[in-house]
Amino acid sequence: MPRRAFTLIELLVVIAIIAMLISILLPAIGRARGTAQAVICQQRNAQLGLATGLYANDHAGRIWPVVRQGWAQRYTWARIWQPQTQDFRPGPVFSYLEYAGETLACPTNRRRSLTGERMANLDRLGEDHELDFDFTMVDGVQGARIDLSRTLYYYDRTREGVPMRPGLRDYARGEGLQFLTAFRSMPVFVEESAYFHNSSISDGMWGNNDQFSARHNGAGHYTMIDGSVGVMRDATGESEEVFNRATDLTAAQVYALIPGRHDTTLRYRSVYFEGLAAGWRHGWIDQAR
């Protein structure tokens, strides 16, 4: 008997079914991939937290410096710049993370800048990255003792009725204290947004107008001083790409309760601006409660 071939209509039906299955499966595969990358990113934050604790154990119980300047070098947790030679060399984190170059990369961003401009100074073994790190250290907490309990707060934009524009140096007078939300533990490292400002000022510091990344389905990770990892969601307003002081949570809107102030409202102070006023004195944050 002669073999019956598929008709054109049958072939088109099969192709349509395959296309429909692909259209259904691809988003699910993409979501699964994004979930896996978020889990890996969280694990890398945890490794960074462990390294921070190991450093503190070797340095009188205090965590890394975020910036320390001297006549011979500018010293941070991640790298050391020597002005005389205009040369960078790895900072202390490389002594506490066996694969620091990999650990400091979010698997979603992979240490890429927005412009493709190469700003990495610490690549070794022929690696090809544009940034030295996707995670940066909270400016105001340098030198914190790991055995003290301090509570930091952030201006929670997700609450109903939240005022649009909080104070910068002092918390908004007469309003807003009810819109402060406490971190479960003090944040030390933040998965920083590539838009503000990790792709333009790759300094390893998180302060002033720097923001959380939203690359994990609208969320970014942060590492706490106890080594645990938190997730910050909905911190970038309508778009991560557009800076809007009225809707975006910035590093300047992270607060500490500073003793010695007469007015209760004014005792809540911006960790960034207080640290700046203290000249980034190592361990100043230990005065907070």
Image: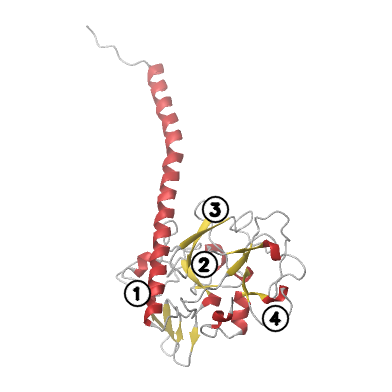
- Labels 3 & 1 near each other (Cβ < 8 A): no
Q: Quadrant of residue 247?
A: bottom right
Return the disc, 3 or 1, that comes first in the chain's sequence. 1
Give how far apart the Cα atoms at labels 1 and 4 are. Answer: 39 Å
Figure quadrant of the C terminus: bottom right
Asked which quadrant contains residue 119, the reply is bottom left
Q: Which mark is residue 218?
A: 3
Residue 226, image x, y percentages: 45, 69
Which residue is depicted at the point 38% across and 69% down?
Answer: 50
Secondary element at tag 4: loop
Q: Looking at the picture, how far across and down is residue 51, in whole percent?
A: 38, 72
Q: Can residue 92 be seen in the rendering of this structure?
A: no
Callout 1 amino acid: Tyr
Q: For the residues carrying marks 1 and 2, which lies nearer the camera in this image?
A: 2
Three-letter amino acid code at the position of disc 3? Gly
Query: Which amino acid type is shown beneath numbered disc 4?
Result: Arg
Single out the mark in the foreground, 3 or 1: 1
Say above or below: 59 vs 243: below
